[in-house]
């Protein structure tokens, strides 16, 4: 069903509390359904995700009895008898929703009647588990002994940890994806019924406790976009504004103490607009910041933007692993203090890296500054891809930067948030490549393929030819339906401008690597660089061709001396990829290896290795060392690994 029709169906449903926003992000991403990647790097990964990862996760949802929880909830309601929740965590419901989101994205790009039927069967089970007033949380509907002691009997009674609002946030995201992919509203109806109940229970003068685990904010904005009902957007803003404020809160018991706020762990120690640092559980934090960026765009909220920019500067300046990993502390799965970035014990949960990727994609649309794309690209190619095996059916939860052989990807986890998260990001990855406004087109990421979009109503086709990320030559063919004036914003990555990250947290060692060059129809041009983009403004006609050449030598990176764990060490990068030393290429042992500054480092294409990679060979003072892309480690069994290598 198309959006206009959905709006018509829902008109008159619920009181309108505020006006429809007139504003939005200044640039709209070109949806993943309109971007086709045909390259050797992403296209096979997307196919593995569709053919292996999503079916694998769907099987795991059944085998781990997450799906059965929905059936048990339906039985408990029909029989008026308590049952028994049959997996481990009350947030297990959310894994089912996230998988439906991933599968819906797959359906949107490629019809698959069998998968579609499978989703409909799942959705029918979810519908049957929903209480008549819209409440949806199987752990409570089933009744019986709670899966965890912190799930109370009463609805909304322990939001600090219950995840009941977190779960439905993922439901709303899944519903928005599913209706977009299939035109069917079977899941959207469930989401709307749930969100209407939440909107009735929570708000000014009613319940004011925000969710302990953020996510519903992102989901509510997507539900607003899918239905046009502004009350969902208002509720998202209400939950964000409720953080760090005690007014109207129902107290809860934490370890025998009565509390109102949830503290730093849940970004609830002070109001969001007063927050200055990234703290606490990193997935919670990332989803809060992403949701706040959505609301900031739709409500033109400058206080939100200011808070987001402060927090972003704190992350990128002091708390970001070179791999784009987020979260130094396993104890609370989250941010540590400034500059504390241990390598072997790094948490860098796949979901935290993804949440921060999603947040940066929104900051990019909000600020139209390529520094956000630099962070996105670093996270995507390194910290997100490392979460998934090359085979597509093994996963990492933490993504450490060093290993003494104890880390192994596994097919599933008892706490299984990461696998469906990586699946939903991979299926939608083409949607992060391009964006457009009325007079500008933004090229944010590089891979061979084609995109169709429109600028001021005129259809436009863009075609990239490149072997990125292995080579830095990129040709972009511009094909408007008729001659068309607009500014083509071509991202010149920070790494090609001698700046690995937009902060002083990391810097390249040695002389600059050469200058990126641009040609338009064969002629070299030097357009102004605005916010990290080379802006080529002209009247484009079919057949115009832009060539960007990014020098891609092997670079040594040093961390800010304040990062104790990286002192006296270097990391190796080439283009957007971070490299590592792994046991199988280096005689088993890597922790004691030394890479002196004088050692010569040379890239070497190895189509036979790890599905085809460019390795880096050391010669001269460190003969025999071979580095592989970080994302590809741990695909040959358990082994030692090191990103930060001793310089002497
Ligand atoms: Zn996770």
Image (cartoon, rainbow, N blue to C red):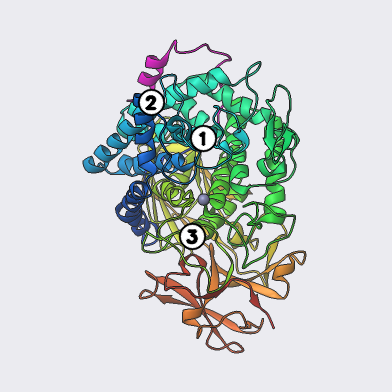
Give residue 71's quadrant in the image: top left
Question: Cα distance, mark 3 to mark 1?
Answer: 42 Å
Q: Is residue 170 left or right of residue 187?
A: right
For the residue labelled by badge 3, is the local secondary structure a helix, a strand or a loop? loop
Q: Is residue 461 visible?
A: no
Q: Residue at x 55, y 24 (%)?
A: 233
Of marks 2 and 1, which one's residue comes earlier in the chain? Answer: 2
* The C terminus lies in quadrant: bottom right
Compare marks 3 and 2 and give the one earlier in the sequence: 2
Q: Quadrant of residue 336?
A: bottom right
Disc 2 on helix, strand or loop?
A: helix
Seen from the viewer's position, the closer of residues 256 and 304 is 256
Q: Residue at x 37, y 47 (%)?
A: 61
> Does residue 9 appear left or right of residue 349 in this picture?
left
Q: Residue at x 40, y 34 (%)?
A: 83
Residue that badge 1 annotates: 439
Q: Which residues are magenta?
A: 1-25
Seen at 43% across and 73% down, the residue is: 637
Between circles 3 and 2, the one closer to the viewer is: 2
Which is more N-terminal, label 1 or label 3?
Answer: 3
Instruction: Say whether residue 272 is magenta.
Output: no
Distance of label 2 from label 1 (alpha carbons): 55 Å
Horizontal side, residue 637 vs residue 399: left or right: left
| SS assignment at label 1 | loop
- Residue identifier under label 2: 77
> Dot 3 corresponds to which residue?
396
Whole-percent x, y for residue 228 in the image: 46, 21
Question: Mark 3 or 1, which is nearer the eye?
Answer: 3
Numbered tag placed on residue 261 in the rendering: none
């Amino acid at each position: 069903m198309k959006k206009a029709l959905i709006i018509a169906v829902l008109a008159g449903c619920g009181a309108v509390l505020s006006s429809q926003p007139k504003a939005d992000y200044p640039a709209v991403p070109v949806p993943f359904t309109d971007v086709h990647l045909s390259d050797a790097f992403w296209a096979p990964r997307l196919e593995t995700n569709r053919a292996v990862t999503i079916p694998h996760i769907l099987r795991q949802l059944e085998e781990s009895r997450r799906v059965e929880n929905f059936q048990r909830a339906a039985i408990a309601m029909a029989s008026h008898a308590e049952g028994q929740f049959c997996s481990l965590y009350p947030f297990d419901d959310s894994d089912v929703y996230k998988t439906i989101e991933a599968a819906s994205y797959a359906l949107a790009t490629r019809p698959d009647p069998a998968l579609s039927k499978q989703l409909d069967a799942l959705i029918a089970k979810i519908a049957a588990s929903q209480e008549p007033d819209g409440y949806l949380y199987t752990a409570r509907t089933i009744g019986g002994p709670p899966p965890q002691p912190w799930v109370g009997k009463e609805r909304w009674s322990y939001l600090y940890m219950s995840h009941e609002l977190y779960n439905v946030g993922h439901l709303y995201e899944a519903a928005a994806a599913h209706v977009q992919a299939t035109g069917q509203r079977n899941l959207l109806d469930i989401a709307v019924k749930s969100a209407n109940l939440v909107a009735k229970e929570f708000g000014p003068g009613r319940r004011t406790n925000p969710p302990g685990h953020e996510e519903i904010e992102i989901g509510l904005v997507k539900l607003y976009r899918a239905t046009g009902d502004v009350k969902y957007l208002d509720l998202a803003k209400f939950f964000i504004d409720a953080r760090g404020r005690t007014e109207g809160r129902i107290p809860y018991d934490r370890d025998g103490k009565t509390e109102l706020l949830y503290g730093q762990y849940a970004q609830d120690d002070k109001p969001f607009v007063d927050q200055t640092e990234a703290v606490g559980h990193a997935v919670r934090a990332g989803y809060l910041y992403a949701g706040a960026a959505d609301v900031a765009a739709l409500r033109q909220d400058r206080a939100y933007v200011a808070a987001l920019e402060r927090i972003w500067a704190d992350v990128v300046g002091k708390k970001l692993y070179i791999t784009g990993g987020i979260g130094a502390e396993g104890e609370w799965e989250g941010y540590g203090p400034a500059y504390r970035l241990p390598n072997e014990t790094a948490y860098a949960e796949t979901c935290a890296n993804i949440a921060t990727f999603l947040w940066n994609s929104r900051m990019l649309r909000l600020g139209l500054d390529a520094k956000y794309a630099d962070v996105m690209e670093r996270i995507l190619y390194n910290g997100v891809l490392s979460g998934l095996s090359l085979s597509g059916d093994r996963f990492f939860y933490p993504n450490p930067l060093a290993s003494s052989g104890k880390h192994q990807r596994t097919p599933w986890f008892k706490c299984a948030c990461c696998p469906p998260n990586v699946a939903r990001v991979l299926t939608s990855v083409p949607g992060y490549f391009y964006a457009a406004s009325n007079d500008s087109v933004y090229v944010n990421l590089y891979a061979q393929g084609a995109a169709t979009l429109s600028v001021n109503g005129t259809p436009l086709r863009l075609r990239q030819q490149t072997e990125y990320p292995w080579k830095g030559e990129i040709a972009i063919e511009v094909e408007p339906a008729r001659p068309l004036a607009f500014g083509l914003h071509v991202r010149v990555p920070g790494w090609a401008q001698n700046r690995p990250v937009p902060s002083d947290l990391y810097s390249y060692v040695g002389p600059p690597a050469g200058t990126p060059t641009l040609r338009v129809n064969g002629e070299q041009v030097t357009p102004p660089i605005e916010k990290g983009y080379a802006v080529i403004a002209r009247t484009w006609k079919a057949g115009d061709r832009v060539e960007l050449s990014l020098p891609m030598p092997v670079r040594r990176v040093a961390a800010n001396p304040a990062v104790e764990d990286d002192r006296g060490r270097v990391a190796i990068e080439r283009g957007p990829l971070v490299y590592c030393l792994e046991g199988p290429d280096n005689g088993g042992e890597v922790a004691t290896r030394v890479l002196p500054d004088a050692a010569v480092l040379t890239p070497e294409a190895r189509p036979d290795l790890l599905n085809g990679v460019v390795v880096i060979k050391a010669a001269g003072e460190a003969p025999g060392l071979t580095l592989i892309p970080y994302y590809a480690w741990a695909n040959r069994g358990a082994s030692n690994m090191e990103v930060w290598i001793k310089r002497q």
